[in-house]
Image (tube, grey):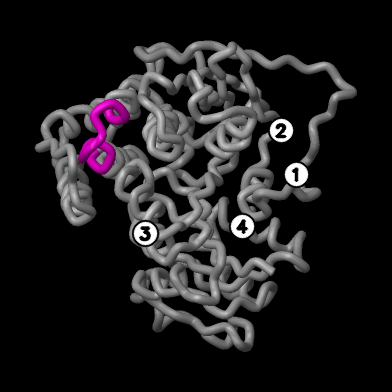
Amino acid sequence: MKRIAVLGSTGSIGTSTLDVIAAHPEEMQLTAITAHNSWEQLAEQSQQFHPRWAVLSNSQCEPAVCSSRFAAGTEVLFGNDQIERVASAEDVDVVICGIVGAAGLKVAWAAVEAGKTVGIANKETLVVAGPLIMDLAARSQATLLPVDSEHNAIFQALQAGKPQEVKRIILTASGGPFRGFTQSELKDVTPEKALAHPTWEMGPKITIDSATMMNKALEIIEAKWLFNLTSDQISVVVHPQSIVHSMVEFVDGSVIAQLSPPDMRLPIQYALTYPDRKAGLNTPMDWSRSFELTFEPPDLEAFPALRLGYEVAEHGGTCGAVLNAANEAAVERFLSGELRFCDIATSCQQILESHQFDPNPSLEDLFLLDDWARKEIKKWK
């Protein structure tokens, strides 16, 4: 019986994880759930799964929370420090880190430091602190498993060969809602248009990242640290059907791909059952009908965020923390109507170029730069 903590259980990753746990009651037990403000949804999850802990990171909402709405036996806690506590608790075997943004880094750090099996669902943990997290995992003997569909696909495909036999990995991108748009056509994009993703249902921040292709830039950085690659071993290809979730090319020319209809429950389940495979909830491929799979190179002029991903992966150090924080703040300003769509990548590049680079930062240094970059974006014009 695997005892599982789902951090960010009310988000898209979290709810999909709960679906997987519900489908495997004899093998998986939900021990902890967390959210930021959504206490009513958290209470409903508590009634269904009866976890030991339910945590709300926003302690200011405590007066409004009705504890009686939670299941008997579920302890309701408040504050980020309590999320770190349950992430490292002895009663937890597996931690799914689904908290979006840099806020997820501290709790992921606590879980890794405690030697847990950690399902990394937020890109930011490795983007901001990749070398530090990987070093910590090696020392604590924690197991890091990618839950993101692309990196989970790479993780599966890598099992077809030895690390030294890998020539490169190919991350697939749907292209988002603006695939085929020129740079000039993107100038008048509104938040409403950017939030209309053609394939995936995700939260607003991740959906905007998909539209700018910043999500793929972050995945390039994440992949470098997670799979111990050089930046020139990572490629990106646009694949609008979102059936091929990523590929690995080996030195002999063989390319191994992982295919499935777009459904986050598959990579989540693989992370939860690894190294075994189980029958799942996702819809299988329908090989009785005709369909096409197409691939095309990304347009780096229309989507300059991708260039930033390669630059940050190449330089490492403090660059990931700055890019990640600047992007989060820029997306917020875009959604509130303060920045244009094309300003997101432009502002991130300028903040990245103006920061004081450190090739070997501490975790404290990274948090300070995170705060600095957000403030710089708020002032950016």
Magenta stretch, residue numbers: 312-322
Q: Choose mark 4 or mark 3, whichever is in front.
A: 3
Q: Earlier in the sequence, mark 2 or mark 1?
A: 2
Q: Choose mark 2 or mark 3, whichever is in front.
A: 3
Marks 1 and 4, how far apart in space?
A: 14 Å
Q: Earlier in the sequence, mark 1 or mark 4?
A: 4
Q: Earlier in the sequence, mark 2 or mark 3?
A: 3
Q: Position of residue 282 (x, y in %)?
A: 75, 44
Q: Earlier in the sequence, mark 2 or mark 4?
A: 4
Three-letter code for the amino acid on which mark 1 is drawn: Asn
- For the C terminus, the quadrant is top left
Q: Position of residue 8 (x, y in %)?
A: 50, 60
Q: Position of residue 258 (x, y in %)?
A: 66, 30
Contact check, label 2 and label 1, Cβ < 8 Å? yes
Q: Give the numbered dot on residue 282.
A: 1
Marks 2 and 3, how far apart in space?
A: 31 Å
Q: Position of residue 318 (x, y in %)?
A: 21, 40
Q: Give the numbered dot on residue 15.
A: 4
Q: Residue at 56%, 24% (x, y): give it.
A: 248
Secondary element at image label 4:
helix
Three-letter code for the amino acid on which mark 4 is drawn: Thr
Marks 4 and 3, how far apart in space?
A: 22 Å
Q: Is residue 300 visible?
A: yes
